[in-house]
Image (spheres, rainbow, N blue to C red):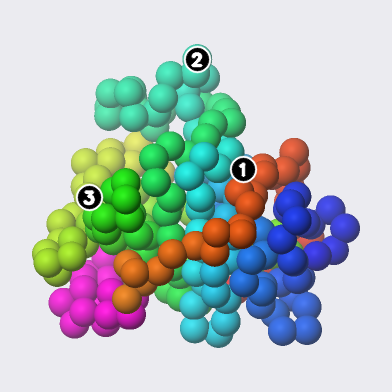
Amino acid sequence: MADGGAVRGDAKRVTAGGPTGFWDPGSQILWRYRENGGPGIHIARPVTVVRDDAELLAAWMAPGTECVKPVLADGTPVHQEPLESRYTKARTVQRDHWFGTGVLKLARPGEPWSVWLFWDPGWQFKNWYVNLETPLTRWDGGVDSEDHFLDITVRPDHSWDWRDEDEFAQARRDGLMDEGQARRVREAGHAAVEVIHAWGPPYSEGWQHWRPDPSWAVPSLPEDWDRTPAHVST
C-alpha cells in the first residue's frame, strides 16, 4: 500500500485502488466504524483478508486482536450505561483486545449489512450475526462503515431473531437517526431477512466450516488507526 496507508505486520499487502482493486488473501487491513452523529472513527479492528473480489470481502478477526472501542468519558463500558443515557453521555475511545473466539466478517459490495460468523471454543459453530450498517467504503488501509444499531441473529437451524431493537429505538429518540434513515434501516433489515428465508449466500456457502491459515500472524493495531483516507471507493 501507499506510504502511510499500510497496516503494520508482515502479511502481503496491495493497494485498494491498485491494479486489481482488491486485496490478496493474507493482507492485513482495518475494519472501522464511524461514530454515530459525528465524523470520527470510534471502532477500529485489524483483520486479515480471506477473500476479496467483486462479489465478496471476507476478513478474519483473530482472538486477542488489539482493537479500538468506544467507552464513556470516565472509562465505563458503554453497555453498562442505562439505555436512557447511553447515547447522550460523553464518550471517548480506548484500546482493548478482542476476547473469546475470533470472528469471520463477510460483506458484499453495496449491501447495507455485513454477516459475521461466531464459534464457541473448539470451533463449534454458534451463529451468524447480521450487522445492519452503511455499505462499506474502501480506502488503501481498509474499509469504513457506520453501524445502524439494529441487528439479526441467525442460528444453524435457520431460525432468527431481531437484536438490539431497544437500542435502535433509543438512537431514534436521541436524534442519532431521523425517520427517513430509520425507515431505510428497517427496509434493509427486511431485505436481509428475505435472504435468510431463502437461505441464500452466505448461509448456503459453508463458511461455518472455514478455518484460518495457521501461518497468519495476528495483525497489530497501527498508531494512526484513525487516519483520514486520502481516497475512498465503494
Residue at 21% across, 41% down: 166
Q: Is residue 54 left or right of residue 130?
A: right
**Cα gap from disc 3 to disc 2, whole angstroms:** 27 Å
Q: Which label's residue is closer to the chain start, 3 or 1?
A: 1
Quarter the N terminus occupies: bottom right
Mark 3: which amino acid?
Arg
Element under disc 1? loop
User: Looking at the image, which residue sits at the far right?
Assistant: 3
Dot 2 corresponds to which residue? Answer: 74
Q: Residue 40 — which label?
A: 1
**Cα gap from disc 1 to disc 2, whole angstroms:** 19 Å
Q: Position of residue 9 (x, y in %)?
A: 74, 52
Residue at 42% across, 54% down: 103
Mark 2: which amino acid?
Asp
Residue 181 visible in the snapshot = no
Q: Which is more toward the observer, 208 or 197?
A: 208
Element under disc 3? strand
Dot 3 corresponds to which residue? Answer: 163
Q: Which label's residue is closer to the chain start, 1 or 2?
A: 1
Q: Which residues are magenta?
A: 189-205
Quarter the C terminus occupies: bottom right
